[in-house]
Amino acid sequence: MREFTTDPIQTLSKSTTHQNGCRQANRRQKWLWLPFFTILFAMCSCAEQQPTQTPNRFALITADKMIPARDDHPPILHHDGWYQPEPINNQINSAGLEDSAFITPDGTMLFFFFTPNADISAAEQVNDGVTGICLSENHAGKWEAPTLVQLSKSNQPVLDGCPFYDGKTLWFCSIREGNFRPIDFWTAERENGKKWVNIRNAGKQLNKDFQIGEMHGSLDGTTLFFHRVTVNQGMDLWQTYLQSDQWAEPTEIQMLNSSADDSRPALSPDESELWFTRTFKGTPAIFRSIRQESGWSAPELIISQFAGEPSIDAIGNIYFTHHFYKDGSMLEADIYIARKK
């Protein structure tokens, strides 16, 4: 068991270096995991009024689109229960950066983080009108054009990412006024299938006391799985249970943790499997553990090589993020799917 650090600045800075981070910091890492957004603690003082109309996200992209045929490091499938991974489609993917996908169990709603360019500053991301959580809905087998999920007033500087939606409540991480630490988790509810309301901080207990990182909850809302950063700067998987309107003291999921980073958990809809990201041979990889009477089984490698942040639908399809690298530089990221056989 690795000791947990309670220093919020250290925790969020390290967590963001791995999961979000700034490119300068990540040049010192063995691999770069795509930024959801670049941390800038003085963000509120430098941000300007956001656009009143959302621009076309494709218009702000300057990079050329990568395709699997030009991918030097494609995802590697290690299990015969799925077909080979492929990009989900060009309605969702772009030459920008799509990351941190969450699929609803019925496969009809796909949330993900988007920014048009990983090199732009946080202040530019705040003001570009397109960086943040996007939602695409599937109707009759066709994905609609993604739209930005509006989780703030038009003049409020925020950076939102890492979505999880249980059908009622949207959980997301955010840099914004009202946080207990640089990045906190917040919640919101969808009103009449359109507007997001009741936007509130997830609370001091989860954010400051427990220092939760990226998370996934049970559909009944009583269990949270999450990662958090340890004093040796690694990431481990933890869980907490809701007891009498309070979250119980978190417990480490020791069976799933290793000497590598273990992070970004995702439950299967039937809650029989726990998926997560682990560093494998120097890059992110996707592992799965199966719930047994005695606890969670030993993790099994499913997809490796710049594959991470899995999300599973009720059929068993795996949605995940894949990063395109060339000559040691990250070019872009897309949402991939490995379809269940």
Image: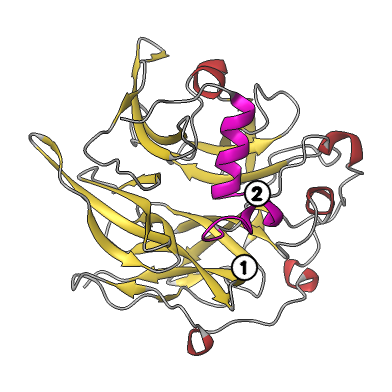
Q: Mark 2 near mark 1, Cβ–Cβ under 8 Å?
A: no
Quadrant the N terminus occupies: top left
Which range is magenta? 8-32
Q: Residues within 10 Å of mark 2 (few under 14, many from 20)?
A: many
How far apart are the two marked residues, 2 and 1, measured between alpha carbons? 13 Å
The location of residue 19, given as percent across then percent down, is: 55, 49
Name which residue lies at 46% across and 34% down.
Answer: 232
Q: Secondary structure at mark 2?
A: loop
Amino acid identity at mark 2 = Val
Name which residue lies at 73% across and 65% down.
Answer: 117
Which residue carries the number 2 mark?
149
Residue 14 covered by magenta stretch: yes
Closest to the observer, 153 or 307 = 307
The location of residue 328, given as percent across then percent down, is: 58, 72
Confirm whether residue 44 shows in the render: yes
The location of residue 237, given as percent across then percent down, is: 36, 37
Q: Residues within 10 Å of mark 1 (few under 14, many from 20)?
A: few
Q: Is residue 281 above or below residue 266?
A: below
User: Quarter-wise, where is residue 178 in the image?
Assistant: top right
Q: Is residue 59 above or below residue 207?
A: below
Residue 267 covered by magenta stretch: no
Closest to the observer, 311 or 229 = 229
